[in-house]
Amino acid sequence: MNLSENRIMPQSETSYLYKACVLLLVLVFSAPSHVGAVTGQAEKLDEVKEADLKEFQEALTQEEQKRQLERADELVSTIKRRRRELKTATGEERKLIERELEHLEKELLNLPERDRIRFNLDGNARYDPNIGRDQPGQGSGDTILSAEGSVEFDLSRKKTDLRWEIGAGRIWNIQFSRNDFWVANTQLRYRRKMFKKLTHSVHSRVSRTSSKTIELDDDRIRWDTNNTTAVNYAFSPKLSVNMGFTHTYRIFTQEEFDQDSGWGVTLSPDLFWQFTPKSRVSLGYSYGARRDRVESGDANSHDVSTGYFGQLTRKSSISFDIGYNRQNPKSEVGQTVNTYRTGLGYIYQWTAKTQLAANYFRSLQNTSSDRVVLAGDETVRSDNHFTNDSLNFSLNSRLTKRLSVTVTTGISHIKTKLDRGEDEEDEGRRWSFPTSINFSYLVNRWLRMQAGYTFFYRTGNAKEDTAQSHIFNGGFNLIF
């Protein structure tokens, strides 16, 4: 659950090769949940895949602790089994089992105990003097407060990862209370290795969102479900195949917003090949279908993607991916969307405590549709070209044992071009230059304090495109 875009996330100092492995694991254990492209918007991970990415990243950064927990689970199972055998053992065999149990129990005392119940609480306060991104001198400021909490029940066993989470969050806007909303959700994660080469996973999420609206005196209620299942089979240590299926459903309970309800499905076969110990390639295809209450939104999509990542030197790694998506409408008034995307990432482990990273993302999107001109009942073909370029740099360093800092800067370029059938005044381009510095202080094992500053500047070929803001934020993360 991500309530605040400026929330500070803990940064890892693992190598880029490990991060690439994380992305591979996400692809292996979860199918893509987007169904088709969204016209005029850059791609973004959905909530389920974002949660999976965070989960696998934490698993890698805490790899040693994970091994210890697995060893503890194995010892508990062994101790239970040997105690049952002790009841029927006699003579020398009984003495051997007793000595073994004594040794196993001593080893178990030195291992961490798995937290079967885990509570998490996040709080954040952010002040933005230009919340509406208006022109300099014309904007209004606002203070945004957010709080979210969750409780997780870990029911995992030796070969099975099973966790259930219940969470809720709330956003308050001091000046513009119409932007307030709250969300409650529950998630179930399951992953199990079956036989020797087969792995099955399931991730299910149900959420309820209540937000302000001008159409009703009451809040607008939205329910979302996202269910993902995937099966991975490893033919060899170098070659594996994955088959994933995702179903999403969104429903608005009030009749005034019923037309925004809809569902979607995605079927995704993927192939992964590790041709050297430090280099991997992936090839994937997905077919998606989306159906809305309003038929103009119905569409089918086809997506093809391929990617590579590998280690360049002992301290640096690189990744590259490219993809194509085509969305075909199911109604005459729908839009045909073609999207070409590519991404390039590089990371350098400068020192044991400092990491430098750079990434570039480019998306080209063409949207075509027919519209009827009332005068003469004439059909006009319209074409909309959308380009999104983004280049970002980041530095992550641990200054002391408890204090770490992250500095990020970048440039983003968005361009819209209309070929025919539309008003040329809608064409244009925008440039954005966000820069931020964030500090994270580990007070103790269960409390982390956070503070940061972001400078945002945007300009374009239209006067109203120019905007700037100085954003301050602070918060805490409590785990127990």
Image (tube, grey):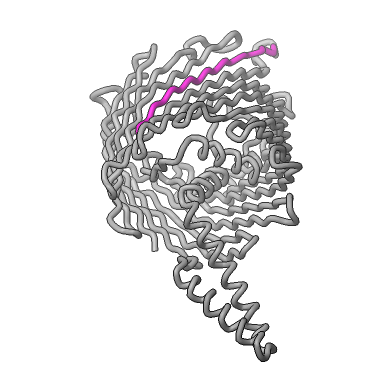
Residue at image position (40%, 52%) is: 170
Lateral position of residue 62 relative to residue 82, left or right: left
Residue 395 on the magenta segment:
yes
Question: x and y percent of residue 185 in the render?
Answer: 52, 56
* Residue 179 shows in this picture: no
Residue furthest toward the front?
92
Lateral position of residue 91 relative to residue 172, left or right: right
Q: Is residue 94 above or below residue 149?
A: below
Corner quadrant of residue 372: top right
Please tell me which residue lies in front, 449 or 111: 111
Corner quadrant of residue 101: bottom right
Instruction: Count the labels in the image.
Output: 0
Lateral position of residue 289 relative to residue 218, left or right: right
Question: x and y percent of residue 156 in the render?
Answer: 59, 64
Question: x and y percent of residue 75 in the render?
Answer: 57, 70
Principal secondary structure, stretch drawn in magenta: strand
In which quadrant is the C terminus drawn? bottom left
Q: Is residue 260 above or below residue 63?
A: above
Question: x and y percent of residue 464 in the render?
Answer: 35, 18
Residue 356 on the magenta segment:
no
Residue at image position (64%, 39%) is: 32
Q: Write the start and end of the magenta stretch as one range.
A: 378-396
Please tell me which residue lies in front, 143 or 265: 265
Residue at image position (68%, 41%) is: 264
